[in-house]
Image (cartoon, helix red, strand yellow):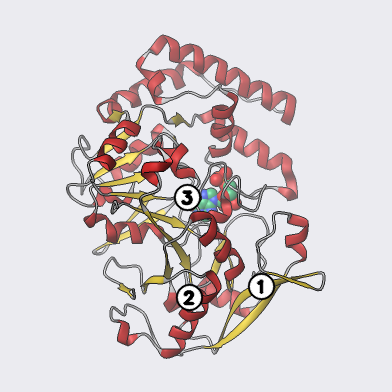
Amino acid sequence: MSDSLVILGSQWGDEGKGKIVDLLAPDYDYVVRYQGGSNAGHTVIVGNKKYALHLIPSGILHKGKKNIISNGVVIALEELLSEMDKVRDVVEDFEGKLFISDRAHIVFPHHKILDGLSEKAKGKNKVGTTLKGIGPAYMAKYARTGIRIADLFDPNYFRKRLEASVSEAKEIAEKVYNQKFDLDINKIYYNTLDMFEKIKPLVADTSLMLDTALKKGEKVLFEGAQGTMLDIDMGTYPYVTSSNSSALGLCNGTGVSPREIGKAKVYGVSKAYVTRVGAGPFPTELHDGDGQKLRDEGHEYGTTTGRPRRCGWLDLVALRFAARINGMDGIIITKLDVLDHFDEIKVAVAYEYEGAVIRDFPASLQVLEKCKPVYKTLKGWDRSTKGIKKKEDIPKEAWEFIKIVEEETETPVVMLSTGPERTEYVWIK
Ligand code: IMP
């Protein structure tokens, strides 16, 4: 049995995975990002310094770790380079520490333009994307017009692909969105090749690297981005991201077989409540003072976009679904301390839909829109749990909360995160 581990979001993203990956990283040889792109945002606090990471795995802040951006990630090279600069006080030389898949696709400026046009055209039905060009980059990938890191090794081939890609984007802009945009292909071409020179020594066949590492028994920590409920296949479609942000994305995102990946443990990270950025169904959303209190206490504003996050009570219907599709071995609850000063805490254990009680997360948005949460109300603990590190310090009312999560999801809660610092957590199993 391998000791590799998957840490992924079991809600709509922003569950605090970055901090968990960061605190667990010392026990692993590799840390791997396998889907999404710079739409993700992880804040890691080390000492009194805050690092906002979007593309580079959180393991980069630790000495001696190999960090991989694997083939399932879409990479905006300018953002990758600027992020490398931001962590330069910790990492001077990235060789041997950061590896970039030769099969990863590149996000280009025209993808960002298309992201904006598509959102604008959707009007009030917009997805609320991060406007980082993620969707259009994955569209190009699946339309087989995308450009991969490997393509940059042959500048002539790259030039042809780039010209085709830009002219396709222009055609989409004109025909679909009735808009024209100007882009200097030469500039993008030379810029991309310049940027590529800087990362060339880091490019690798990461599928092979990972397969070899896993077979040798090296320990790999897989770091999911976004969350299960934003998964392109299993999430609240169409209000989702464009990749498989559940455990389902592990094989295609790393190029490693299900046989090897399947040996890793899976821990799903869940806030003690729910947040969501962008549009889409959110059955337990609160529009009242409790919602604002969660936002204020939890500092719920996006790392990537700064947008205020929508907030609501913990949704165990969604968490039960996430536990099942991810095969979760454990749940890590973050931000428990945000609930510290509520007299009553609610958790949704089912939905009521047209008079019937349902416990399984429905596919249809029309059904979801009409679902009313069936809540269990728990007594608050009115005591600070901020920064607690010992099981004995967990209030008995908080144990009740944990018990309900475990019963309803049939999954053990293994850890509580009790603050943003690396040291603020307690294993409870
Ligand atoms: P996109 O990934 O930028 O295309 O955005 C699609 C949806 O996923 C939008 O609702 C975004 O707000 C959401 N999203 C994307 N990345 C994240 C993330 O890291 N955390 C939370 N939500 C995200």
Judging from the image, what secondary structure is the residue with disc 1 in? strand
In which quadrant of the rendered image does the C terminus lie? bottom left
Q: In this view of the protein, which residue sits in the foreground, 386 or 119?
A: 386
Q: Which residue is mark 3?
A: 247
Q: Quadrant of residue 144?
A: top right
Identity, as a three-letter code, of the amino acid under mark 2: Glu
Return the residue at label 2: 297
Q: Residue at x 64, y 69 (%)?
A: 285
* Residue, far top: 156
State which tag comes first along the sequence, 3 or 1: 3
Q: CA distance from mark 1 to mark 2?
A: 26 Å
Q: Is residue 188 shown above or below 348?
A: above
Query: In the figure, is residue 99 to the left or right of 310?
Result: left
Rounded to the nearest whole Å, what is the CA distance between mark 3 and mark 1? 24 Å
Q: Position of residue 371 (x, y in %)?
A: 74, 67
Give the foreground label among 1 and 2. 1
Q: Is residue 316 visible to us here?
A: yes
For badge 3, the amino acid type reads Ala
Crowd tier of the residue under label 3, counting other residues whose Cα lies within 10 Å: few below 14, some 14–19, many 20 or above = many
Query: Which structural element holds mark 3?
Result: loop
Label 1 is placed on what type of residue? Ala
* Residue located at (26% from left, 49% from top): 219
Q: Which residue is mark 1?
A: 350
